[in-house]
Image (cartoon, helix red, strand yellow):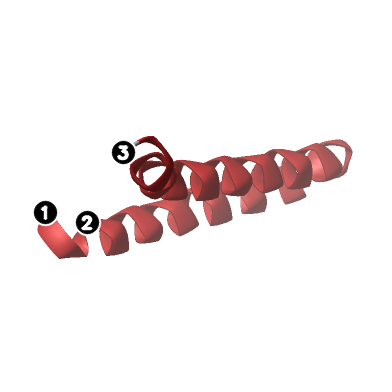
Amino acid sequence: MGKWSWVVAASAFVTVHCGLFTFFVKCRMCHFLSLVAINHAILAGHVAMHLPWFIERCCY
């Protein structure tokens, strides 16, 4: 995919999380849990995105 791969990945990421958010909002009991899950997923995605750069800088 080349240089556009991050655009595709970001679009898919946003689409999936907006879909999950909309789904869980319908269930009030699940609303807080969905926010926690989404925040953790965003954090995990952010870490995964920067991990190769970090490894390259620190380990080579």
Could you tell me if the residues under marks 2 and 3 are in contact, i.e. CB atoms within 8 Å? no
> Which residue does the image show at 39% across and 59% down from the upper left?
10
The x, y position of residue 17, in whole percent, is: 55, 50
* Residue that carries the numbered disc 1 in the rendered image: 1
Amino acid type, label 3? Tyr
> Which residue does the image show at 65% across and 51% down from the upper left?
21
* Residue that carries the numbered disc 2 in the rendered image: 5
Amino acid type, label 1? Met
User: In the image, is residue 41 above or below residue 7?
Assistant: above
The kind of secondary structure element at disc 1 is loop
Crowd rating for badge 2 (residues with CA inside 10 Å; few <14, some 14–19, many 20+): few
- The quadrant holding residue 60 is top left
Which of the two residues, 3 or 54, is positioned nearer the viewer here? 54
Could you tell me if the residues under marks 1 and 3 are in contact, i.e. CB atoms within 8 Å? no
Crowd rating for badge 3 (residues with CA inside 10 Å; few <14, some 14–19, many 20+): few
The x, y position of residue 1, in whole percent, is: 11, 54
User: In the image, is residue 37 above or below residue 5?
Assistant: above
Looking at the image, residue 1 sits to the left or right of residue 45; the answer is left
* Residue that carries the numbered disc 3 in the rendered image: 60
Could you tell me if the residues under marks 1 and 2 are in contact, i.e. CB atoms within 8 Å? yes
The kind of secondary structure element at disc 3 is loop
User: In the image, is residue 38 above or below residue 11?
Assistant: above
Q: Nearer the viewer, mark 1 or mark 3?
A: 3
Which of the two residues, 38 or 16, is positioned nearer the viewer here? 38
Q: Nearer the viewer, mark 2 or mark 3?
A: 3
Taking the view exactly as shown, the residue that stands out farthest to the right is: 29
